[in-house]
Image (cartoon, helix red, strand yellow):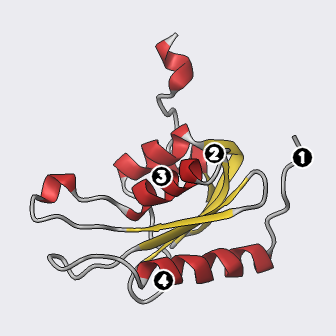
Amino acid sequence: MRLIDVTEETWARLTEAAVEAMGRAYAPYSGFSVGAAALTDDGRVVSGCNVENAAYGVTLCAECSLVSELFATGGGTLRAFVCVNGDGEPLAPCGRCRQLLFEHKGPELLLATPAGVLTMEQVLPGAFGPEDLS
C-alpha cells in the first residue's frame, strides 16, 4: 500500500475539519468542546466531536466519534490525526483515546500535538494491540 504524503496543506485541511467538528460538539457540562479529524489510508478525511452525557462515564470523546465515522464511511486505517480544543489549538489525546487510535492506525500514524507532530509509537510506546491477543 502506498503511503499518502502528509504535507503542510494536509495538516491545515485536517485542522480545519477538526475545528468544524468541534463546532458541533455537545459539551453542556464541561463547556470543553473538542474536535478531531484524521486522514485515512485511502485519502478520506474523517472527523468527530465530543458528546457529553449527564452520566459522565458514558461521554464520548471526539476520537470515539471519529473512529465511528471511519467505519461508517468504509473503514480503513488512520494516517494522520489532529485534535483541537475550543480555540482551535492542538490537544494531545488522553490515554484511552491513544489506545483507540492505536487500534485503527495505519503504518506510521502521525499525530499533531502541542509538542509538534509525533508518531503513534512516541505517544503510546509499547502499546497493547490485537497481536497481543493471539
| Residue closest to the far bottom | 87
Name which residue lies at 41% across and 64% down. Answer: 62
Mark 2 vs mark 1, foreground winner is: 2
Q: Secondary structure at mark 1?
A: loop
The quarter of the picture where the N terminus appears is top right
Marks 3 and 2, how far apart at CA: 9 Å
Marks 4 and 2, how far apart at CA: 27 Å
Disc nearer the start of the sequence (3/4) = 3
Residue 26, by quadrant, is: bottom left
Task: Tell me which amino acid carries mark 3.
Answer: Ser
Q: Residues within 10 Å of mark 2 (few under 14, many from 20)?
A: some
From the image, tell me which residue sits under label 4: 89
> Horizontal and vertical percent for residue 5?
85, 62
> Horizontal and vertical percent for residue 104?
57, 42
Marks 4 and 1, how far apart at CA: 30 Å
Q: Disc number at residue 68?
A: 3
Task: Tell me which amino acid carries mark 2.
Answer: Gly
Q: Secondary structure at mark 3?
A: helix
Mark 3 touches mark 4? (CB < 8 Å)? no
Disc nearer the start of the sequence (3/2) = 3
Q: Nearer the viewer, residue 83 or 40?
A: 40
Disc nearer the start of the sequence (4/1) = 1
> Horizontal and vertical percent for residue 47?
54, 67
From the image, tell me which residue sits under label 2: 75
